[in-house]
Amino acid sequence: MPKRSSTTHGFSAASKLLQGRIRQASESRGFAQSRVLTHWEEIVGEDIAAMARPVEVSYARKGIGATLSVLTTGALAPLVEMRKEEIRNRINAVYGYNAIARLRVTQTAATGFSEGQVDFTHKPKAEAPAAPSPEVRIRARQSVEQVGDEGLRAALERLGTNVLSKGRTGQ
């Protein structure tokens, strides 16, 4: 029987080469198992993964269960805060026990301090809207003719003109 030669010619899969380094990096950040990092989207779902990402796991000196810190932007923090228990339950379901006892939401710009700053430049002024057509004005005036109060009638006519002129075609 001839000796079978390997088709890889001594090369290993990249995942095998990086597996030890990924484990070492994740353990240095508190993740005993890198599954939370590598499969974050699968564990928590696409919607939560788009809002937050895991940052750190810290353990109390005398206590069971760890604290997971997740990073999100300031605008999304209330949404992530509302779903903390759901996130915690999904992660614990992967581990099979109460590995994460608490979840802490940290908010900042995900890109960093200098890149994530709010833009304070003024936006260019929008063009003034085109004046409503005479037909729209007549239609709005006719729809509020029966209102007795003159001020209310004028306000309702302006409102009707604006509503009718906002491109509500095809209705």
Image (cartoon, rainbow, N blue to C red):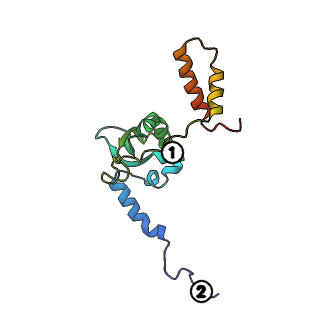
- Pinpoint residue 134: horizontal percent, then vertical percent: 63, 33
Residue extending furthest toward the right: 170
User: Is 105 on the left or on the right of 160, as rendered?
Assistant: left
**Residue at image location 50% in from the left, 72% down from the top:** 13
Secondary structure beneath label 1: helix
In the depicted view, which residue is nearer to us: 9 or 160? 160
The amino acid marked with disc number 1 is: Val
Is residue 41 positioned above or below 6 on the image?
Answer: above
In the depicted view, which residue is nearer to us: 14 or 80? 80
Residue at the disc numbered 1: 44
- Pinpoint residue 154: horizontal percent, then vertical percent: 54, 20
Residue at the disc numbered 2: 3
The amino acid marked with disc number 2 is: Lys
In the depicted view, which residue is nearer to us: 30 or 138? 138
Whether residue 95 is visible = no
The span from disc 2 to disc 1 (Cα, nearest Å) is 48 Å
Quadrant of the rendering where the N terminus is positioned: bottom right
Of callouts 2 and 1, which one flags the residue occurring earlier in the amino acid sequence? 2
